[in-house]
């Protein structure tokens, strides 16, 4: 009896085209896995695209957020792309370089991993001056745009204004930065940390018709329907899924260490359910 043929998997070009289509209309949720297992689980739930999380990945390597090297990030991106059939958007931090030339080189390497999109932040990591000066930040975005265009131009570029999570929650400055990043070639704009209706609608209006990503990284009264009504095109959750997983682990581990008790395991996921999902998932998938 002939073997059942394995369905063809989407190519990198297929995934990039699909990713651009998702940004054309409507509002979609792009959750953030931190490893291959969490990515495959989310794909199995039917999400049409996924985004990496710099914090979630860093914690899995016993590092703080922004504590991984470019080489570590690139290896992680390549693994996530190879393990999934949906577009992957890279949380690429600040491009792992301060100058525009360094950002361009980092972006070139990231594009080579097969990611469908990547974001570049304008944060410096320095407490005294947490954001790059606007002209410097714009030149860094332009360098990222040129690197993508030289590679074919089909990787989506996300420009991030980090003020609200870098200690500079200035809406006027954030809007000015996002407009400049849109003009510099960003395909999608993102200001993590904005939360109010007024902030969100101001960002959407400032960069229209380009799409906006909204971070919902904690418990919130927002729903996808109410967010969509504000004109947001996509919603990500950052490190929230990783933190939720860590919370369960930390509660159980602390109880073991401090009380010698096992009650927290009552909330553990079913090993049978996990085994069944990953067995079925592996049976229907073949690595490239």
Image (cartoon, rainbow, N blue to C red):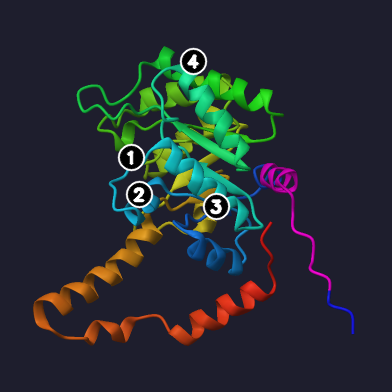
Question: Mark 4 highlights which residue?
Answer: 139
Q: Nearer the viewer, mark 4 or mark 1?
A: 1
Q: Is residue 109 above or below residue 276?
A: above
Horizontally, is 150 left or right of 177 in the view? right
Question: Mark 2 highlights which residue?
Answer: 58
Tag 2 and tag 1, C-beta contact below 8 Å: yes
Asked whether residue 229 is in view, the answer is no
Element type where label 2 sits in the image: helix
Question: Mark 3 highlights which residue?
Answer: 79
- The residue that appears at 28% across and 46% down in the rendered structure is 64
Distance of label 2 from label 1 (alpha carbons): 7 Å
Element type where label 3 sits in the image: helix
Tag 2 and tag 4, C-beta contact below 8 Å: no
Q: Is residue 180 above or below residue 69?
A: above
What residue occupies the far top of the structure in this picture? 135
- The residue that appears at 70% across and 72% down in the rendered structure is 284
């Amino acid at each position: 009896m002939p073997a059942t043929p394995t369905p063809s998997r989407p190519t990198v070009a297929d995934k990039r085209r699909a990713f651009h289509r998702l940004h054309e209309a409507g509002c979609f949720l792009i959750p953030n896995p931190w490893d291959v297992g969490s990515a495959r689980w989310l794909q199995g739930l039917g999400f049409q695209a996924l985004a990496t999380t710099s914090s979630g990945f860093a914690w899995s390597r016993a590092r703080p957020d922004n504590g991984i090297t470019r080489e570590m990030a690139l290896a992680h991106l390549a693994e996530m792309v190879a393990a999934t059939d949906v577009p992957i958007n890279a949380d690429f931090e600040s491009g792992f370089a301060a100058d525009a030339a360094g950002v361009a080189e980092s972006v070139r390497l990231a594009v080579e991993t097969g990611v469908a999109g990547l974001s570049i932040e304008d944060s410096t990591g320095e407490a005294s001056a947490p954001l790059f000066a606007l002209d410097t930040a714009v030149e860094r975005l332009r360098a990222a745009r040129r690197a993508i265009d030289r590679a074919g131009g089909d990787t989506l570029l996300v420009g991030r204004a980090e003020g609200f999570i870098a200690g500079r929650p200035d809406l006027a400055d954030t809007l000015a930065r996002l407009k400049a990043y849109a003009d510099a070639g960003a395909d999608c704009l993102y200001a993590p940390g904005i939360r109010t209706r007024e902030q969100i609608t101001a960002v959407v209006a400032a960069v229209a018709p380009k799409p906006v990503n909204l971070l919902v990284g904690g418990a919130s009264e927002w729903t996808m329907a109410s967010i969509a009504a504000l004109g947001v095109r996509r919603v990500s959750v950052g490190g929230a899924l990783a933190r939720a997983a860590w919370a369960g682990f930390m509660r159980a581990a602390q109880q073991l260490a401090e009380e010698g008790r096992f009650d927290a395991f009552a909330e553990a996921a079913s090993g049978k359910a996990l085994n069944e999902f990953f067995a079925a998932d592996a049976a229907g998938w073949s690595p490239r």
